[in-house]
Image (spheres, grey):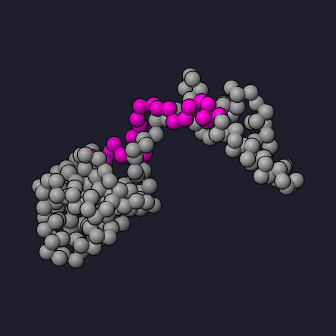
Amino acid sequence: MHFLGAVIGGNNTSEAEAIIDPYSEYEEVEEYVLYTRDEFLKDNQENDRRLIEREGENQHDRTSEAFEKAERRLALNDEEALEAYAEYCGYSLNEDGDVVSTFNNDSFYDWYEFGGRWEEMVGGLQGITCGELKERYGDGDSEVRELLDCNVSVVCDNDGYEGGSWFPVSRGALFERLGNDSSARVWFVDFHD
Protein backbone atom coordinates (compact mmCIF):
# COMPACT_ATOMS: atom_id res chain seq x y z
CA MET A 1 0.00 0.00 0.00
CA HIS A 2 1.34 3.42 -0.96
CA PHE A 3 1.00 6.45 1.27
CA LEU A 4 2.49 9.93 1.21
CA GLY A 5 4.82 11.16 3.90
CA ALA A 6 6.40 14.48 4.76
CA VAL A 7 9.98 14.26 6.02
CA ILE A 8 11.03 17.38 7.88
CA GLY A 9 14.75 18.04 7.98
CA GLY A 10 17.84 17.54 5.94
CA ASN A 11 19.25 19.89 3.34
CA ASN A 12 18.95 17.27 0.59
CA THR A 13 17.36 13.89 -0.01
CA SER A 14 20.40 12.03 1.36
CA GLU A 15 20.06 13.81 4.68
CA ALA A 16 16.29 13.21 4.63
CA GLU A 17 16.97 9.50 4.07
CA ALA A 18 19.03 9.45 7.27
CA ILE A 19 15.93 10.68 9.13
CA ILE A 20 13.68 7.89 7.83
CA ASP A 21 16.20 5.02 7.83
CA PRO A 22 15.47 3.98 11.45
CA TYR A 23 11.83 3.31 10.50
CA SER A 24 12.46 0.79 7.71
CA GLU A 25 11.25 -2.79 8.07
CA TYR A 26 14.76 -3.80 7.00
CA GLU A 27 16.55 -1.86 9.73
CA GLU A 28 17.88 -4.60 11.97
CA VAL A 29 17.50 -4.03 15.66
CA GLU A 30 18.99 -5.87 18.59
CA GLU A 31 17.44 -9.29 19.13
CA TYR A 32 14.46 -9.23 21.49
CA VAL A 33 11.96 -11.74 22.86
CA LEU A 34 8.78 -11.66 20.79
CA TYR A 35 7.00 -14.44 22.73
CA THR A 36 8.10 -16.35 25.78
CA ARG A 37 8.51 -20.10 25.39
CA ASP A 38 5.44 -20.88 27.49
CA GLU A 39 3.08 -18.39 25.83
CA PHE A 40 4.20 -19.41 22.33
CA LEU A 41 3.71 -23.10 23.06
CA LYS A 42 0.35 -22.56 24.80
CA ASP A 43 -1.05 -20.29 22.05
CA ASN A 44 -0.06 -22.64 19.24
CA GLN A 45 -1.36 -25.74 21.01
CA GLU A 46 -4.68 -23.94 21.60
CA ASN A 47 -4.81 -23.00 17.91
CA ASP A 48 -4.22 -26.62 16.89
CA ARG A 49 -6.91 -27.85 19.32
CA ARG A 50 -9.42 -25.35 17.91
CA LEU A 51 -8.57 -26.43 14.37
CA ILE A 52 -9.13 -30.08 15.25
CA GLU A 53 -12.41 -29.32 17.04
CA ARG A 54 -13.68 -27.24 14.12
CA GLU A 55 -12.54 -29.54 11.32
CA GLY A 56 -13.25 -32.69 13.31
CA GLU A 57 -16.97 -32.05 12.90
CA ASN A 58 -16.73 -32.98 9.23
CA GLN A 59 -15.23 -36.39 8.34
CA HIS A 60 -13.82 -35.01 5.07
CA ASP A 61 -11.92 -32.27 6.93
CA ARG A 62 -10.31 -34.88 9.20
CA THR A 63 -8.17 -35.94 6.25
CA SER A 64 -6.95 -32.45 5.44
CA GLU A 65 -3.22 -31.79 5.62
CA ALA A 66 -3.70 -29.00 8.18
CA PHE A 67 -5.72 -31.32 10.42
CA GLU A 68 -3.10 -34.07 10.18
CA LYS A 69 -0.22 -31.71 10.95
CA ALA A 70 -2.08 -30.25 13.93
CA GLU A 71 -2.69 -33.74 15.32
CA ARG A 72 1.00 -34.64 14.88
CA ARG A 73 2.17 -31.46 16.63
CA LEU A 74 -0.18 -32.05 19.57
CA ALA A 75 1.24 -35.56 20.00
CA LEU A 76 4.80 -34.22 20.43
CA ASN A 77 6.47 -33.53 23.77
CA ASP A 78 6.92 -29.85 24.63
CA GLU A 79 10.49 -29.54 23.29
CA GLU A 80 9.64 -31.19 19.98
CA ALA A 81 6.40 -29.21 19.70
CA LEU A 82 8.25 -25.95 20.36
CA GLU A 83 10.65 -26.69 17.49
CA ALA A 84 7.77 -27.75 15.21
CA TYR A 85 5.77 -24.58 15.93
CA ALA A 86 8.82 -22.38 15.43
CA GLU A 87 9.47 -24.01 12.06
CA TYR A 88 5.78 -23.81 11.09
CA CYS A 89 5.62 -20.09 11.98
CA GLY A 90 9.05 -19.23 10.59
CA TYR A 91 10.40 -18.06 13.96
CA SER A 92 13.79 -18.37 15.62
CA LEU A 93 14.25 -19.53 19.19
CA ASN A 94 16.88 -18.51 21.72
CA GLU A 95 18.61 -20.91 24.12
CA ASP A 96 15.65 -20.60 26.55
CA GLY A 97 13.14 -21.55 23.87
CA ASP A 98 11.72 -18.03 23.60
CA VAL A 99 10.75 -16.73 20.16
CA VAL A 100 13.20 -13.99 19.20
CA SER A 101 13.24 -11.43 16.43
CA THR A 102 15.31 -8.63 14.97
CA PHE A 103 12.33 -7.16 13.09
CA ASN A 104 12.04 -3.42 13.60
CA ASN A 105 8.74 -2.97 15.46
CA ASP A 106 9.10 0.79 15.06
CA SER A 107 8.97 0.52 11.26
CA PHE A 108 6.25 1.97 9.09
CA TYR A 109 7.50 1.25 5.54
CA ASP A 110 9.32 -1.36 3.49
CA TRP A 111 10.46 0.88 0.65
CA TYR A 112 10.08 4.45 -0.53
CA GLU A 113 10.68 6.88 -3.37
CA PHE A 114 10.96 10.65 -3.14
CA GLY A 115 7.90 12.03 -4.91
CA GLY A 116 6.91 8.69 -6.42
CA ARG A 117 3.29 8.51 -7.53
CA TRP A 118 2.76 12.00 -6.09
CA GLU A 119 5.64 13.53 -8.10
CA GLU A 120 3.33 15.70 -10.19
CA MET A 121 1.75 17.14 -7.06
CA VAL A 122 4.89 17.54 -4.93
CA GLY A 123 7.70 17.94 -7.48
CA GLY A 124 7.80 21.73 -7.20
CA LEU A 125 7.62 21.57 -3.40
CA GLN A 126 10.54 19.23 -2.69
CA GLY A 127 12.94 20.94 -0.28
CA ILE A 128 10.64 23.86 0.49
CA THR A 129 11.03 25.19 4.02
CA CYS A 130 8.36 24.60 6.63
CA GLY A 131 7.84 28.36 6.85
CA GLU A 132 7.30 28.72 3.10
CA LEU A 133 4.95 25.74 3.02
CA LYS A 134 2.83 27.09 5.88
CA GLU A 135 2.80 30.55 4.29
CA ARG A 136 1.55 29.16 0.98
CA TYR A 137 -1.08 27.19 2.88
CA GLY A 138 -2.17 30.35 4.72
CA ASP A 139 -2.29 32.29 1.45
CA GLY A 140 -4.80 29.77 0.09
CA ASP A 141 -2.53 27.94 -2.37
CA SER A 142 -4.96 25.22 -3.53
CA GLU A 143 -2.26 22.64 -4.32
CA VAL A 144 -0.61 23.04 -0.91
CA ARG A 145 -3.99 22.96 0.83
CA GLU A 146 -5.01 19.75 -0.96
CA LEU A 147 -1.64 18.20 -0.19
CA LEU A 148 -1.61 19.01 3.53
CA ASP A 149 -5.34 18.61 4.20
CA CYS A 150 -5.93 15.38 2.30
CA ASN A 151 -2.81 13.53 1.28
CA VAL A 152 -0.11 13.39 3.96
CA SER A 153 -0.41 10.17 5.98
CA VAL A 154 2.83 10.28 7.97
CA VAL A 155 5.15 13.03 9.14
CA CYS A 156 8.70 12.20 10.17
CA ASP A 157 11.46 14.34 11.66
CA ASN A 158 14.45 13.94 13.96
CA ASP A 159 12.06 13.43 16.91
CA GLY A 160 10.30 10.41 15.39
CA TYR A 161 7.17 9.99 13.31
CA GLU A 162 3.40 10.21 13.59
CA GLY A 163 0.78 8.55 11.43
CA GLY A 164 1.13 5.68 9.00
CA SER A 165 -0.63 3.87 6.20
CA TRP A 166 -3.72 2.87 8.21
CA PHE A 167 -3.93 5.71 10.73
CA PRO A 168 -2.89 8.95 9.03
CA VAL A 169 -1.31 11.78 10.96
CA SER A 170 -3.80 14.33 12.25
CA ARG A 171 -3.79 17.78 10.68
CA GLY A 172 -2.95 19.27 14.10
CA ALA A 173 0.09 17.01 14.58
CA LEU A 174 1.28 17.73 11.04
CA PHE A 175 1.07 21.48 11.52
CA GLU A 176 2.69 21.27 14.94
CA ARG A 177 5.70 19.52 13.42
CA LEU A 178 5.80 21.97 10.52
CA GLY A 179 5.81 24.81 13.06
CA ASN A 180 8.74 23.53 15.12
CA ASP A 181 11.43 24.97 12.81
CA SER A 182 10.35 27.28 10.00
CA SER A 183 13.75 26.97 8.28
CA ALA A 184 13.70 23.14 8.13
CA ARG A 185 13.19 21.68 4.68
CA VAL A 186 10.32 19.35 3.80
CA TRP A 187 10.67 16.34 1.52
CA PHE A 188 7.64 14.45 0.23
CA VAL A 189 8.04 10.70 0.03
CA ASP A 190 5.96 7.92 -1.50
CA PHE A 191 6.17 5.22 1.18
CA HIS A 192 5.07 1.64 0.72
CA ASP A 193 4.08 -0.90 3.35
Q: Position of residue 14 (x, y in %)?
A: 24, 48
> Does residue 110 appear left or right of residue 158 in this picture?
right
Give residue 190's position: percent from left, percent from top: 35, 60
Instruction: Determine the image quadrant of residue 26.
Output: top left
Res 129 seen here: no
Residue at the location (40% across, 59% down)?
167
Q: Is residue 165 above or below residue 94?
A: below
User: Residue 156: x, y in percent?
Assistant: 28, 52
Q: Is 67 situated left or right of 59 in this image?
A: left
- The quarter of the image holding the C terminus is bottom left
Q: Is residue 101 at least partly visible in the picture? A: yes
Q: Is residue 47 left or right of residue 129?
A: right
Q: In this image, 75 relative to 155: left or right?
A: right
Residue at figure coordinates x 55%, y 35% from the top left: 35
Q: Which residues are magenta?
A: 19-41
Nearest the eye: 7 or 56: 56
Name the residue rendered at 32%, 70% in the picture: 150
Q: Is residue 150 magenta?
A: no
**Of residues 185 and 47, the one drawn nearer to the viewer in this rendering:** 47
In this view, the residue farthest toward the right is: 59
Residue 117, relative to residue 18: is it above or below?
A: below
Identify the image quadrant of residue 140: bottom left
User: Going 74% across and 27% down the picture, which residue do you hit?
Assistant: 77
Q: Quadrant of the N terminus?
A: bottom left
